Amino acid sequence: MGKIESVQQFLRNQDVDAAFVTTPDNIFYLSGFSSNPHERLLGLMIFKEAEPFIICPLMEVPDVKATGWPFEVIGHADTEDAWDVVLKAIRNRGYMPKSFAIEKSHLTVERLERVDQLFPGATFTRLDEQLNRMRVIKDAEELTNLRIAAELADYAVEVGCKEIAEGKTELEILMAIEFEMKKKGVQKMSFDTMVLSGPKTASPHGTPGDRKIQKGDFILFDLGVIYNGYCSDITRTVAFGEPTDAQREIYETVRQAEQAAVDLVRPGVKALELDKAARDVISTAGYGDYFTHRLGHGLGISVHEYPSITGTNDMILTEGMVFTIEPGIYHPDITGVRIEDDVVVTADGVEVLTKFPKELRIIDPA
Ligand code: GLY
Ligand code: MN
Ligand code: MN
């Protein structure tokens, strides 16, 4: 069954008249059209029975058609009220929906009020989980894109390692990585590239800046690229010069925690078991208080999607799920270390997409 048909099947099962999808990533998943509409209206309307349509800024109509979208595409000019255009397109189909499935986690209050005004008395149900469930299992083509995205991320870390030198700033290294990615044809990174050094590695969501690399630093790279619409997300932490025993101990603890979770991945295991496996290693070593986030997150068109790999998610892993495994220890007085891989649940185990080595890489400052 096609993706649009799956949503129509959902509408029939729930007895809902129409689905109105406005999240760009969900629109890309369902239609193949990718765009950032900023504040303009971009929507995909799917009806229980009638043909779907895409509503988009007028200037993007040719781009939608170029994707091979086989149904109607309606443009709205910047001088028009996009919602009047939506209403007209629906009326042309000869009926007025009385119930809508919407992405409640995305549709703004302002937009919801507008839909409510155009369709007085309409009821609203959640579409979010249905789309998340559809997206959580990747098909062969999606896996190919994710494999290539991961390969490029491995290469980006290698570039970063080669750029490390005493006195260079985090931003200079970051710039070299992204310059090289652009040369490889990468249009966009999955998120803002992170290059953190020395004490800054102890901040899981730190911001790269003008700190200069010094001997004895650990340097943490967290980055990813988008390939054909699919994201990678890798973290590696390397040493610049001989590490101290304390730094080594933290690194080895994270490496063992990460490997313990990777080794557990197979169909039938619960997401929370992975988090526990990694967290147990870190807690047993005495660093439990310094591992302050979940183990990982699903990966695909969005850099964070289903499934969330937390200590409370009892979702059962199934073949085709793709997610990150990224334990960390963030010690303000010693160092921060995170190691992050992208993994696929296979029929009988795991495929690790990111292949950059995980033994501690020591970069010689000489
Ligand atoms: N840098 C985002 C993440 O690893 O989740
Ligand atoms: Mn990451
Ligand atoms: Mn991640």
Image: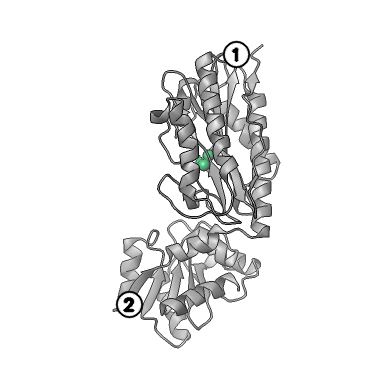
Q: Earlier in the sequence, mark 1 or mark 2?
A: 2
Q: Label 1, on which residue?
A: 242
Element under label 1? loop
- Say left or right for 187 vs 125: right
Image quadrant where residue 124 sits: bottom left
For residue 16, say whether it is visible.
no
Number of on-image labels: 2
User: Where 289 falls versus 364 (above or below)?
Assistant: below
Q: Position of residue 276 (x, y in %)?
A: 46, 40
User: Where 176 falls versus 232 (above or below)?
Assistant: above
Q: Position of residue 355 (x, y in %)?
A: 67, 38
Q: Position of residue 236 (x, y in %)?
A: 58, 31
Q: How is the image coloured?
A: one colour
Measured in 3D between alpha carbons, the distance from the residue under mark 1 to the one under mark 2, in whole angstroms, is: 66 Å
Observer-nearest residue: 211 or 319? 319
Label 1 C-beta lies within 8 Å of the nearest ligand 2 atom = no
Assign the N terminus to one quadrant of the image.
bottom right
Assign the C terminus to one quadrant of the image.
top right
Q: Give amino acid for label 2.
A: Ala
Instruction: Pick out the residue farthest to the right.
Output: 184
Observer-nearest residue: 316 or 195? 316
Observer-nearest residue: 52 or 84? 52
Q: Residues within 10 Å of mark 2 (few under 14, many from 20)?
A: some
Q: Which residue is rendered at x = 65% and y = 70% of the image?
A: 68
Q: Which residue is rendered at x = 46% and y = 56% of the image?
A: 38
Q: Label 2, on which residue?
A: 122
Q: Position of residue 52 (x, y in %)?
A: 52, 77
Q: Give amino acid for label 1.
A: Glu
